[in-house]
Amino acid sequence: MKAAFKNICVVGLGLIGGSIIKKINLLDSATQVYGLDINDKVTKEAHAQGLIKNSENNLKTLPDNSLVVLSVPSLSPESAFEIVKGSIQDKDVIFTDTFSSKSQLINFLEKNEGLKKDFIMSHPIAGSEKSGLSNSISSLFENKLVVLSSMDASPKINRVKVFWEELGSRVIVMDPLEHDEIFSKTSHLPHVIAFALMSYLKKEFGENVFNYSGGSLEGYTRIASSDPTMWKDIVISNKKEILLSLKGFKSSLREITDLIEVSDEDSLLDFLMRIKDSRDDLVEEDK
């Protein structure tokens, strides 16, 4: 098969970056795969597994017709770019990322006009509460959504779209500011709530938190085991939208709190039934 790019360089070989290089290596294509990581040991391990061509944490020259994927925490676009910048000599290089929020990246690109025209933003809606190269899997992106954004109307977005489709993903295009607003509610808010809930329960029950659960609590709070560094960066980089989402969520909490306080059984049942039916319908439509 003819690949979207002859060469792929992934900067950051954790769960997402590692899953990208594992999947590319399974494809029947002639794509050359390179990888860089802030941890030399991770780069060497990826090479030892036969996942990347380079064994050292540097590249002298990245060949032409390349895609560079910055797969690092959301507050680190500049440091990730610095790792690979010296290897880029050809103009036929496109950049993308895997950040869950785009505001910090937008600020970085606004200061780097030359890079901005070659940068197509990506957000693969895939992941796990586990992290690191050892937990990466080649099937991570299969049938998962990837959201692409661009600061300019660039035809290069089509090549990046094909790249993600090669990994098995469904791809849509969205304005980057709209992206941060939407995912502050559907992704970032649930993670913040899970961390906050675990904090509260740990204070209440100490080491016995899960002794009083039939299993649903473990499932509900699973995402509180996600990479703290990654989520610290997401929360800070998308601070404005997350705070607005928390404000909206608090209003919903107040609504059900008021119903409980006045013991309004009919209204409380109506509230619970309405939400249950809405969720059931939405899940059914999504199948």
Image (tube, helix red, strand yellow):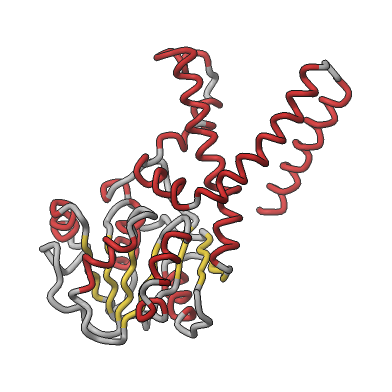
Position of residue 16 relative to residue 226, above or below, is below
Q: Measuring 51% from the left and 38% from the top, which residue is drawn there?
A: 192
User: Which of 136 and 237 lies nearest the eye of the viewer?
Assistant: 237
User: Which of 187 and 55 lies nearest the eye of the viewer?
Assistant: 187
Q: Is residue 137 visible?
A: no
Position of residue 204 relative to residue 199, above or below, is above
Residue 119 quadrant: bottom left
x then y, percent, for residue 174: 58, 68
> Which quadrant is the N terminus positioned in?
bottom left
User: Which of 196 and 133 lies nearest the eye of the viewer?
Assistant: 196
Q: Residue furthest right?
A: 266
Q: Is residue 32 visible?
A: yes
x then y, percent, for residue 46: 19, 57
Name the side, left or right, on which 23 lies relative to 48.
right
Q: Residue furthest front?
A: 111
Residue 202 quadrant: top left
Residue 226 quadrant: top left
x then y, percent, for residue 116: 40, 76
The number of numbered discs placed on residues in the rendered structure image is: 0
Q: Measuring 88% from the left and 23% from the top, which residue is drawn there?
A: 266
x then y, percent, for residue 242: 55, 46
Name the side, left or right, on which 61 lies relative to 240.
left
User: Which of 168 and 213 lies nearest the eye of the viewer?
Assistant: 213
Q: Measuring 64% from the left and 40% from the top, which residue is drawn there?
A: 247
Position of residue 10 relative to residue 239, above or below, is below
